[in-house]
Image (cartoon, rainbow, N blue to C red):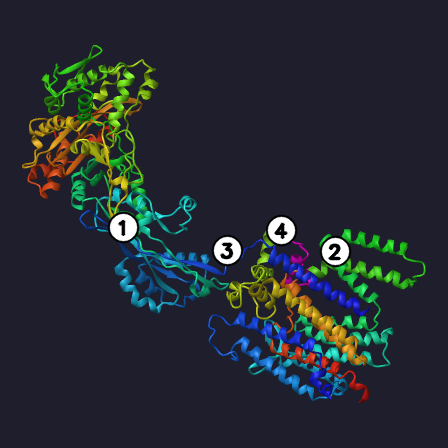
Amino acid sequence: MRGNLLIFRLDWISIFLLLFLIGFGWINIYSTTVGNDLSGPLLDLGTFYGKQLFFAILSLIAVILYSFIPDQFIERFSSVFYIIGIALLLGLFVFGKTIAGATSWYDLGPFNFQPSELMKMIVALALAKYLSDTGVNLRYRVHQGYAVLLLVLPSILVIAQPDPGSALVFFSLFLVLFREGLPLYYLTFVLSFILAFAATLKFGMTYTFIGTLALYLSYLWLKPKRLKTPLWFNLSYPSILFVIIASTTWVYNSVFKQHHRDRFSLWLNLETNQDRLLDIKQSIGYNTYQAKQAIASGRWSGKGFLEGTRTKGDFVPAQHSDYIFSSVGEEWGFITSALVILSFVALLLRFIYLADRQKKAFHRIYGYGITSILFIHFSINIGMVLGMLPTIGIPLPFFSYGGSSLLFFCLMCYIFLKMDANRLKTHFD
Amino acid sequence: MSRFFYSLVIIIIGLLFIGKLVSLQLFYEESNNVESDPAITKNYLYPERGFIYDRSGNLLVGNQPAYDVMVTPREVASLDTLEFLKLLDLEKEEFIDKMARANRYSTRLPSVLVANLSKESYAALQEKLRRFQGFFIRKKSLRDYYTTSAAHVLGYISEVNTDDIRRNDYYIPGENIGRTGLERQYEELLRGRKGVSYVQKDRFNRVIGPYKEGSLDSLPEMGKNIHITIDKTLQEYGERLMNGKRGGIVAIEPKTGEILSMISGPTYDPSMLVGRQRSANYTAMYYDSLSRPTWDRSILAQPSPGSPFKALNALVALQEGAINPRTTYSCDEGFYVAGVKRGCHCGGGVRDLNSGLLHSCNAYFAESFRSFYRKFETTTEAHDTWEAHMKSFGLGDFLGTDLPTGAPGRIPSTEFYDRAYGRNRWVSTFVISNAIGQGEVAATPLQLANMTAAIANRGYFITPHLIKEVEGENTIDYKFRGKRYTTIDEKHFEPVIKGMEAVYTSGTARFLQVPGIRIAGKTGTVENYTRIDGEKVQLTDHSVFVAFAPVEDPKIAIAVYIEHGYYGNRYAGHIASLMIEKYLKGEISRVDLEKRMLEKTLAKEYAKPMSGKPFEINEYAW
């Protein structure tokens, strides 16, 4: 039967979306890095676009090879992968290669290998494996603790590199935990802590203190009688809030580095000294400013492929990697940029749909895991390029230059797509 | 949390991003054009400025290459400073200062290290500069003068200022514009049109290649060469004659209105306003408020014309029938106005038109002037008629010549005197000074020369001009070709010209005859008053002379005005006579006369009123 072949059972909607994003992403990498000499071969490993093409081909090979590996293999060995991944992250402290201040790479001759890219997939697998265990229930605090530890351990290791962007990706897997039954009030707590911190920076300690107190008292006053919370909680939660409010100034001034402070002050509009503000805008805000200018100059239909003057002039730093979307905006204009965003949205929605039709919990949770990873990459990166979020260095999946990133994103998605293709089959194994 | 909540969050984020894209790409102010894009730079390609030739094709103004030594601080490798400084002839302190300034401006963009290098030092440097990384030579073009004269006519070019840029968007800072003279008048012809090339730059402002493969670029359009009416030899000769004298000489070819020479004294060498010393030279001249070398007296000085004006008054009286060539008036070594005697130097006796002109008799012209006014019912009517006749000779208003500056002179109108005396409260005796070219009338040397040309042409003139030919164009402006007729009938000119010829044969200029050439002329001695410490003081008279030659077929009409030159034939007459001979014969037969003019200066005369001590005026001794 025709349907028995794997290739016909794959979800081609997702594959078309992925191929579009990868292909169009490579076109933009070509445009941002090719310079003025267009005569060179495309697969020139001395160039960014050549390397990226090489990795695209390598990804295809990896995907084809993986097609011959049974799904059970990946499920069974996910704990082993996790241990190997942690070992690789630890190994960076000894053998790592430092690029732009972050020790995140292994030097493999012509290429650099970034284990945290691989680790994203591994953590998604490990989390799926743990949560799909019939004995695990996220209502129990012990299980909550183990699940969180799976995320926090690699996060700590990448923060130490330092690569806070990747740590953020691991934290995005909390979305999976919430989907799988982690009580929502944890999210409320964390959000309220972040809010308290930001509010203190913006409005000052006194006002935030009074405001928080007023809000909390009115909550106690207005909450329905049937909602009973233990006394220790009623006391400790506001206490933690107040400690955060009280320590904000110290943390901001003493723990944060100047470049962190600058990003915050730019984002929350804290700086009142106009000269200093201009200074920050020109240094920290420079990338964002140039990216916004480049995108804005694209108008409806863009300046055309290879015609983006700011792209060619290299005005946007890191344009082939984190700021690649600005090249799309300048050279292709609004219509195509919107199409790219819609493609990402469609892919994410499609993955959620696919995840929910899985019969096995492991597959469903893994689907949600990679959706969360893709989602955090997409929203943080585009939000940063469009100037809606502070600068956090995190690549745009399939678009940004980066060999290991492309390879593991492809593999990560394909693992899920293969699970989906085999979702009916697995029952009979 | 349900899958719908997750989907909703994803959709909302997607919509937020698209909304932001809409506001950035569709509503954001910044427009996408090559002019405002910081990544695209417009580079200009400058055509060579047009050359200026004289009437016989001698080159007056060309261009010379000049060299700036440029430095790009970032590219400077370690260098043998000692050798380098020796090569450039720079002091160490100066070098350090200039390098610091270049560094401040930009480390990646070139700055000027040494400007306007001479050809010799360039030749020496050219070979060796290769060894000094980060330094290179930028070639540019400066004006190159092949004459030391005609500075005022040619004018100079200088860098545009903010006003120029506001007035004309062709220019950008750093470009040159014709500032005065012909350089300004024919700026658009001479400069050509610059070409544009758009280049793509990177974020360090470095050029990385042409923008859109140069599809928007344009080539420069060459500046046009022009030929002007100035006779180089005559101009240079005139300037030599003006040695140490203040005043103006204008010579015109009557038949065509072409200005043969236009000299203002004192003047300067035009090459003084080019190159490294330009600023110092200009400042020195600008602050010389006594001799004012930058002030073009040939077109801007407006003295009373003096006795040459008598020829015009004679023409007006003849035209209106107030006199005929045989009318006589007697001169009692003066004449009476309202019972007061005014002097005359002619010697006295009975004067007709001919002898009145040749002896420059004040009495004769005062009487004929009065009889002209008596022909009319009212003074107003008479004066209006007189004014119209005078203005038809190009007096009292701008002549419309092709120079960017000029002066109108003055022919006082009826309203002018009405304002001074009251309506109908003045008569001819009030304005009698005009009869002899004193009083309220005023004219520039150019106007005097033009008036002489009109007499030489027996009744018309062509607007005096300097342009003779624009290379690549068939003809010059119509306004420099059309005849402008005076209001005097042709027949009245002959008796007046006869009288002017007699000035040379037996009159005030009889010692200035040129052998073999019939000249008609008229001397003028203009009273000269000034104020010193608020007191009206008379100074030595201005010397004025107009002449044309040959009488039968005029080829040159000339006006000479020499400040403090005393009587008409003394300086002005000498110079006019020499100029005519030089132009018509090519050489000077009266060497003693020439020697005197080349050597004599009026420095002593000009110093008198400045000395603060009492002084004599109109001293006869040379």
- Asked if badges 3 and 1 are on one and the same chain, I answer yes
Task: Tell me which numbered mark, 4 or 2, is placed earlier along the sequence.
Answer: 2
- The amino acid beneath tag 4 is Asn
Distance between the Cα atoms at labels 1 and 4? 64 Å
Front residue of A83/A302: it is A302
Please give the residue where the numbered disc 3 appears in the rendered image.
Answer: B36
Where is residue B480 drawn, in percent x and y? Answer: 25, 40
Chain under callout 1: B
Q: Examine the image and state in which quarter residue B592 appears.
A: top left
Residue B62 to residue B547: above or below: below
Residue found 17% across the figure and 40% down from its top: B238
Quick check: is B585 in the magenta stretch? no
Distance between the Cα atoms at labels 4 and 2? 19 Å
- Asked if badges 4 and 3 are on one and the same chain, I answer no
Please give the residue where the numbered disc 2 appears in the rendered image.
Answer: A200
**For the residue labelled by badge 2, is the local secondary structure a helix, a strand or a loop?**
helix
Where is residue B150 drawn, in percent x and y? Answer: 23, 44
Residue B463 to residue B377: above or below: below
